[in-house]
Image (spheres, rainbow, N blue to C red):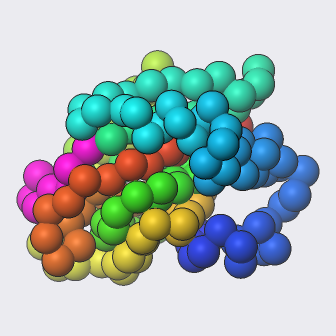
Amino acid sequence: MAIFGNINNIEKQIDKELFKIAFEYITKIFDDKSKEYKRLQNLNIGDFIKVELDSNNFALEQVYYTKERENTFFESHKKYIDVQVILEGKEEIELENIKYLIIKEDYNFEKDLIIYQTPNNRTSIIKLKTGDIGIFFPEDAHMPCIKYNNIQKIIKTVVKVKV
């Protein structure tokens, strides 16, 4: 089941060993003196950078504009847990257990990605803002990047933690 909230509260609720590398990196991206923070702040809209954290975990640093719901999609992963961290901005993420969704695109092993049909009705909605984290496990289909009130710039990193 997904876990979400402010970074200070999340760290107390998770398996410290499994997420150790992720939280070491996350600490750096919120330190305005670190090279990680500076790198993220210097990204342009549309930039997408993969950063290797160790042999099992990596981060996807990105900057984009949020979208209308109909321009996003539900996804899940088998090999990695998503730790989505908002450095700047606000977005909605819809959430649903994969057993309640219909697969639109079968599992892509290279991308570790399953895409689902978007249901007509809204599902659970998480609103993440600067300093918030959403952790999505393999059974958690999630639809990120949805506008929160209005379209806005997001600076985000997604840490991929190997299951």
Residue ranking furthest to the front: 33
Q: Is residue 83 left or right of residue 73?
A: right
Q: Position of residue 147 (x, y in %)?
A: 20, 66
Q: What residue sits 71% from the left and 28% below the top?
A: 53
Whether residue 28 appears in magenta in the rendering, the answer is no
Q: Is residue 3 above or below residue 27?
A: below
Q: Residue at x 23, y 73 (%)?
A: 148
What segment carries the magenta color?
64-71
On screen, residue 127 above or below 33:
below
Q: Is residue 12 left or right of residue 133?
A: right
85 relative position to 29: left or right: left
Q: Where is residue 45 drawn, in percent x and y?
A: 24, 36
Q: Which quadrant is home to the C terminus? A: top right
* Residue 69 painted magenta: yes
Q: Quadrant of the N terminus?
A: bottom right
Residue 104 image position (x, y, % from top left): 23, 44
The residue shown at (87%, 58%) is 16
How many numbered marks are there?
A: 0
Determine the residue positioned at 54% across, 66% down. 131
Residue 69 found in image quarter: bottom left
Would residue 163 appear left or right of 64 to someone viewing this image? right
Is residue 140 visible to us here? no
